[in-house]
Image (cartoon, coloured by chain):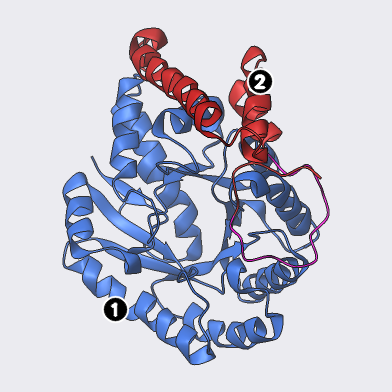
Amino acid sequence: MRYIEPHAHMVSRTMDDYKALAMAGCRAICEPAFWAGFDRSSVQGFHDYYRQLTEYEPKRAAKFHIAHYSWICINPKEAEDPEFAREVIKIIPEFLKKENVLGVGEIGLNKNSKNEVAIFEEQVQLALDHDQLILIHTPHLEDKLKGTKLTIDILNQFSGIQPNRVLIDHVEEHTVKKVVEAGFWAGITLYPESKCTPPRAVDMLEQYGSTDRLWMNSACDWGISDPMALPKAILELRKRGFDDAAIDKFVYQNPLKFLRQSGLEILPEV
Amino acid sequence: MAESKVDMVDAYFMDARSKLIDIAAFMDRVERLGGAEDYRYREFVTALSALKSSNRAETVLNMLSDPSTEPIEKAGLSPAAGAYKKA
C-alpha cells in the first residue's frame, strides 16, 4: 500500500532500509535535520550536513524510486551554545531556497532549557521571515508534557503563526489533544520503546483522526528505531477494521495535504 | 471510519496478558535482586494506581512527567530517564 514516511533520518540508515521501504510502498521520505549523536564543532560541519540532506540523500532515495525531501535547522540538542547556534542559523536561508526543502525543522525543545527556548524562537522567526512550514520536535519521556505546553505557548506569542502550517511531532496520549485543539498538526511517532506503539497510534487516530491534522512516522535514526514502523501501523489499522480509503488518508493524503503547503509539487493526490 | 466491528479482547488479550506478566516479572526481579529504592521504580509502582482510573494511558504518562512549567536554566548532558525525579 502506498504511503509517505514524513519523518525519517535516512543519513543513519542503509540502502537495505531504502529497499525495504520501497518494497513496502513508500513513495516519499521527509528528512528533518537532527543531532548526529555528538555535537558538530563548526559551521562548515553543518553546511556539509545540509548538503548531504539536500544533494546526496535524494540520490540514494531515487535509486529506489522514492522521492526525498528535507527540513533544515539546528536541532534543540545543539542550542546550549547559543552564539554558535546563531552562526549556524545564518547559513540556513541558503538551503531554504532549494527545490527539495520543505521548511524549517525539526526545531523545538529537548530538555526545556532557556537557551533552547531562545534558539527555538529565533528559528520560528526565521521560518516566518522566509514563509516556510515548521516542523517541531517535542521532548522525550518525562520532559514531553512540559515541553509541549511550552511549545504551544511560545508559538501563540507569534502573531504571524498559522497553526495549519505547523506540525508538532512525537505526540502521545497526554499531549495529542492539546496540539490538535490548538489548531496545529500533530505527528505520532512509532518507536519500539520510548514513544508510541502501532496499537496506541491507532487509538489516537480513532479519537482524533477526524481532524485531518494527524500523521504517523517512524522517525528512524541511529538509535533504537524501526524504519518499517509505518507498514506495521498500516497492518494494525487493517486489524482494527479501517478500510483502504481511511488508511490512505492517514498515511498518504494527510501528509500530502500538509507538505504541499510548502509549494513543492509532491507526488500525485490520486 | 472503521469498516467492521472488531472484538478488542480477541485482538489484544494475549498481547496484554504477556505484557502484564512481564511487568509482574520485572517487579519480582527488581525486588529480588535490588533496585526497589530507585526513584524510577518508585514512580513506576506509583503509576500503577492509574490502572484503576479512566484514561489510563494518559494518566500514566502524566504521572511520570515533569509537572513544572518554567524553562530550566541549562540543559544537562544526561538523557531523559522515563520518570520525573521529585525533589
Q: CA distance from mark 1 to mark 2?
A: 48 Å
Task: Give residue B50's mark.
Answer: 2
Q: Is residue B63 found left or right of A104 in the rendered image? A: right
- The foreground one among A160 and A3 is A3
Q: Residue A29, percent across and down?
A: 34, 59
Q: Chain of mark 2?
A: B
Q: Give left or right: position of A132 versus B49.
A: left
Write down the chain letter for disc 1: A
Q: Secondary structure at mark 1?
A: helix
User: Which dot, 1 or 2, sits closer to the camera?
Assistant: 2
Majority secondary structure of magenta residues: loop
Task: Please say if the residues under marks 1 and 2 sit with CB atoms less than 8 Å apart.
Answer: no
Label 1, on which residue? A56
Write the start and end of the magenta stretch as one range.
B65-79
Q: Residues within 10 Å of mark 2 (few under 14, many from 20)?
A: some
Q: Looking at the picture, does residue A77 appear above or below residue A54?
A: above
Residue A118 at least partly seen: yes
Percent across and percent down for residue A209 are: 51, 32
- Quadrant where the image shows the C terminus of chain A: top left
Tint applied to chain A in the drawing: blue
Residue A111 drawn at (x, y percent): 67, 59
Label 1 CA crowd tier, 10 Å (few <14, some 14–19, many 20+): few
Task: Relative to A46, say whether A115 is above or below.
Answer: above
The residue positioned 29% from the left and 78% from the top of the image is A56
Does the segment drawn in magenta span residue A217? no
